[in-house]
Image (tube, grey):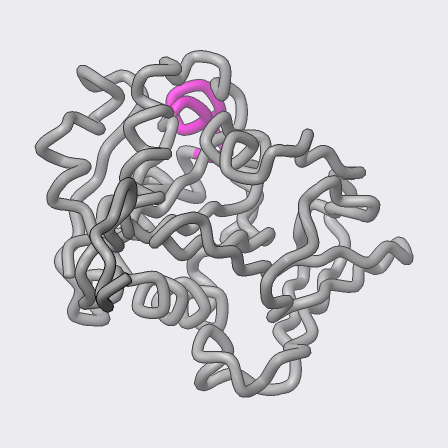
Amino acid sequence: MKITVWNENRHEQKNPRVKEVYPNGIHGAIAGFLEKSGLDVTCATLDEPDHGLTEDVLNQTDVLVWWGHIAHDEVRDEIVDKVHDRVLNGMGLIVLHSGHFSKIFKKLMGTSCNLKWREADENERLWVIDPAHPIAEGLGEYIDLDKEEMYGEHFDIPTPDELVFVSWFAGGEIFRSGCTYRRGQGKIFYFQPGHETYPTYYHQDIQQVIINAVRWAKPSPRSKPAYGNAKPLEKI
């Protein structure tokens, strides 16, 4: 299984605090723990040719992990279309944190994907509400994060196929923070934690969720369905 971790890599260049927290980039931190789990991982960033998502890269990617925030509009539509096509044809997609506003997630969801937010260094508790789900494997009843950016309802997304996590924030809000979808042959997981100025991706349980999600989202070993005009199986 081949994994590609995609990141804008813009905050790391502009904000010293982000560079301090993630000296190898957010993509580097995520790729690091995925590699330690035994996965084959490469990285791609916004400013590379074709945003690092060439046809060769996409065709070889089984699961794409996506982190974006301040440069969603800079992602070219033709690249979004190629990613969209790959998901429909079986590539898994893990969308993290502010990637909810990415072109690819909004295209796949068909909604605004808007929400409430607040940066106030507040505690977040992610409750595991589907403990039997493969993405929750190895976790306790909840994950506690000392500091995270608040994301709150209403979250303008379609009703998830499966809801794995619901978060509570110290300010009182709740949020559907772990949602799965199927689009075509592809599996999608949205996971909310991961604000760029917090060391969220070093948290062991957060790493476990993403590792589990990548393994869950891998393409299924089945042939592509046949479409169009079909000859009858029986005599008619």
Residue at the spot x=28%, y=27% of the render?
82
Q: Is residue 16 magenta?
A: yes
Q: Position of residue 100 (x, y in %)?
A: 58, 38
Q: For the stretch drawn in magenta, what is the main secondary structure?
A: helix
The image quarter containing residue 223 is bottom left
Give the left or right position of residue 50, taking residue 178 as reference. left
Which quarter of the rendered picture does the C terminus lie within?
Answer: bottom left
Instruction: Tell me: residue 105, above or below residue 205.
Output: above
Q: Is residue 221 above or below residue 191?
A: below
Q: Can residue 5 be seen here?
A: no
**Residue 57 in magenta?**
no
Residue 134 can be seen, yes or no: yes
Instruction: Name the residue nearer the viewer: 83 or 73.
Output: 83
In the rendering, at what x and y percent does residue 114 appear?
A: 72, 33
Residue visible at 73% across and 63% down in the picture: 167
Residue in the picture at 53% in, 52% down = 190
Q: Nearer the viewer, residue 147 or 1?
A: 1
- Residue that lies at the very extreme toward the front in this rendered image: 236
Image height check: is 154 above or below 105?
Answer: below
Residue 144 x/y as whole percent: 65, 71
State the residue lying farthest toward the right: 172
Relative to 213, is 81 above or below? Answer: above
Q: Nearer the viewer, residue 192 or 61?
A: 61
Q: Position of residue 18 (x, y in %)?
A: 47, 35
Residue stretch in magenta: 10-18
